Image (spheres, grey):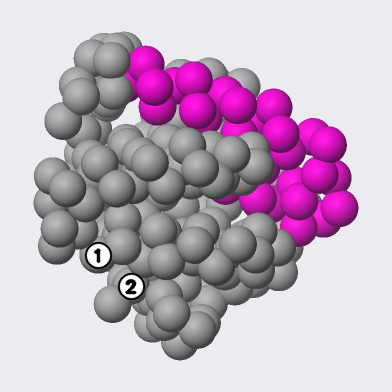
Amino acid sequence: MYSVLSVALCLLILCAGCSRDGEEEYHPSQRALELNNRAVRALGKRDLEAALAFAEETVALEPEFYQAHANRAAILRELGRTEEAVAALEALVAMRPSYVEAYVPLGLYLEAIGRELEAEPHYRKALALYEARLDTDPGDLRAAVNRAIALYLLREPARALRGLRKVLAEDPEDEFASAVKYRIEQGDRARFVQGFREPGSGAKP
């Protein structure tokens, strides 16, 4: 079962080093991949300072490795440095506006520091980009789940659940889709948001 932390990271870490947004495909160097993977492993072990050090070394080595910027922001958030995490993601989407994986976390971090009105446009941007991706590749189930998350954060739970049911019809074993569906069915948006912001014991608290 996905932990709360792993659900959060699923938005950030999947397809590391891949381009899915129609821009020229980017392949990070082996060294950058190794550093990024060390950051992710350290984060999983809750060694946050080490995780941040690896992430910062990665982005210094290859500033165009956008996934590493997103991971760095997630680590800053876990360290309680949320305003820095917001600034990191704002810089990332300024560099690459098509980088869809940055927008939902950016909205969540803005909500965490009381800037709810600023969060909504980022959820809408995420929704538009995920829908464009699905127009190109209707079989991209991860994009479909992330689209559902954006819909729920935009207070459209019925549409979000319809999308998740379609995903689970295609792949009944998709634990990420099941975990997100369970949380949405609880009907508590504040708790859903909190679940993406703090580590916890499991997808079904």
The image shows residue 196 at horizontal and vertical percentages of 55, 63
- Relative placement, left or right, of 32 versus 111 is left
Q: Residue at x 44, y 21 (%)?
A: 129
The image shows residue 152 at horizontal and vertical percentages of 56, 45
- The residue identified by callout 1 is 175
Q: Residue at x 42, y 36 (%)?
A: 147
| Disc with the residue nearer the chain's start (2 vs 1) | 2
Q: Which residues are magenta?
A: 105-133
Asked if labels 1 and 2 touch by Cβ distance under 8 angstroms, the answer is: yes
Mark-to-mark CA distance, 2 and 1: 7 Å
- The residue identified by callout 2 is 2
| Three-letter amino acid code at the position of disc 1 | Glu
Using the image, determine if residue 8 lies above or below residue 24: below
Q: Residue at x 81, y 44 (%)?
A: 116
Q: Is residue 32 visible?
A: no
Q: Closest to the observer: 109 or 17?
A: 109
- Relative placement, left or right, of 108 versus 118 is left
